[in-house]
């Protein structure tokens, strides 16, 4: 089994590769930015009622994904700082550490890719994890299952909104990792539940998908006022 140091080094290099992939999109054949609708990241209203507008078109989808990856990354930051993590088994610690590193890679990739393609990344979001006890195993793993299942369903629902085939390919690669996370967390909670009927339609074998509006309604429960998302620009959501 790789040591944490080896795993960390691998993921660090993986982060660099993802960033280079995003930057390379701007230089291949037709500039993918030509296919993207320019977005204007903005807030609506003022103060505590402000909403973060993710924008529209492909940039809107990228910012939408960036918002979710920010939320997941912040969650695992807190997990690794809590006492449950320090008491967990070696296997659970490895899983939580790897997921944490993956989410940071995804978060940083989206921020870099949006800027590289000429868009405006949304601001850093302020999470609200007040309902999660990071010292309690059940509370942490239940929240992790919520975030991972939500992430997979969000990517599935947003995929049809992307116009750029290059970006759709990358999103497909990221959602496959998110699905591995979701399956792992589910099996840590209860062995054999990784394809539960609440997430996979047993008739079709397809994972559920959620529209951006549905995802934002759930994600906003874990975001502080002023950081809640407005996804109305994703018109098919």
Image (cartoon, grey):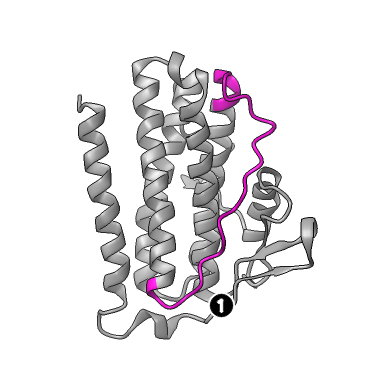
x and y percentages locating residue 113 in the rendered image: 39, 67
Q: Quadrant of the C terminus?
A: bottom right
Provide residue 131's location: percent of width, then percent of height: 69, 31
Q: Is residue 75 above or below residue 85?
A: below
Q: Is residue 19 left or right of residue 108?
A: left
Measured along the vertical axis of the image, is residue 114 above or below residue 176? below
Q: Nearer the viewer, residue 197 or 84?
A: 84
> As rendered, which of 158 and 15 lies closer to the eye?
15
Q: Position of residue 228 (x, y in %)?
A: 69, 55
- Along the line of sight, the residue nearer the viewer: 156 or 13: 13
Specify whether residue 197 is in view.
Answer: no
Q: Give the residue displayed 26% in from the left and 64% down from the top.
A: 20
- The residue drawn where x is 46% and y is 80% is 36
Residue 174's place in the image compared with 200, above or below, is: below
**Local crowd size for mark 1, using a 10 Å CA cut-off: few (<14), some (14–19), many (≥20):** many
Tell me the residue that label 1 is attached to. 39
Is residue 27 something one can see in this rendering?
A: yes
Which residue is at 36% across, 50% downward?
105
What residue is drawn where x is 51% and y is 67%?
Answer: 121
Magenta span covers which residues? 116-140
* The stretch drawn in magenta includes residue 117: yes
Looking at the rendered structure, the secondary structure element under dot 1 is loop
Percent x, y of residue 181: 42, 37
Q: Is residue 88 left or right of residue 27?
A: right
In the picture, the quarter occupied by the N terminus is top left
Q: Is residue 159 rendered to the left or right of residue 53?
A: left
Overall secondary structure of the magenta stretch? loop
Q: Nearer the viewer, residue 6 or 81?
A: 81
Q: Quadrant of residue 60?
A: bottom right
């Amino acid at each position: 089994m790789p040591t944490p140091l080896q795993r960390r080094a691998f993921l660090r290099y993986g982060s660099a590769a993802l960033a280079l992939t995003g930057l390379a999109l701007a230089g291949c054949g037709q500039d993918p930015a030509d296919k993207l609708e320019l977005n204007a990241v903005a807030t609506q209203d003022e103060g505590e009622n402000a909403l973060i507008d993710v924008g529209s078109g492909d940039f809107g989808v990228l910012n939408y994904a960036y918002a979710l990856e920010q939320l997941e990354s912040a969650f695992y930051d807190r997990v690794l700082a809590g006492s449950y993590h320090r008491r967990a088994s070696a296997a659970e610690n490895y899983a939580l550490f790897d997921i944490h590193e993956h989410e940071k890679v995804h978060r940083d990739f989206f921020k870099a890719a949006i800027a590289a393609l000429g868009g405006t990344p949304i601001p850093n979001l302020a999470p609200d994890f007040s309902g999660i006890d990071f010292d309690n195993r059940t509370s942490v793993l239940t929240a992790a299952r919520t975030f991972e299942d939500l992430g997979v369903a969000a990517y599935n629902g947003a995929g049809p909104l992307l116009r750029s085939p290059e970006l759709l390919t990358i999103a497909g690669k990221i959602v496959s990792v998110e699905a591995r996370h979701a399956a792992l967390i589910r099996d840590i909670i209860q062995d054999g539940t990784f394809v539960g009927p609440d997430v996979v339609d047993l008739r079709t074998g397809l994972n559920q998908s959620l529209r951006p509006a549905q995802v934002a309604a759930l994600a906003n429960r874990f975001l502080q006022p002023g950081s809640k998302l407005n996804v109305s620009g994703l018109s098919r959501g």
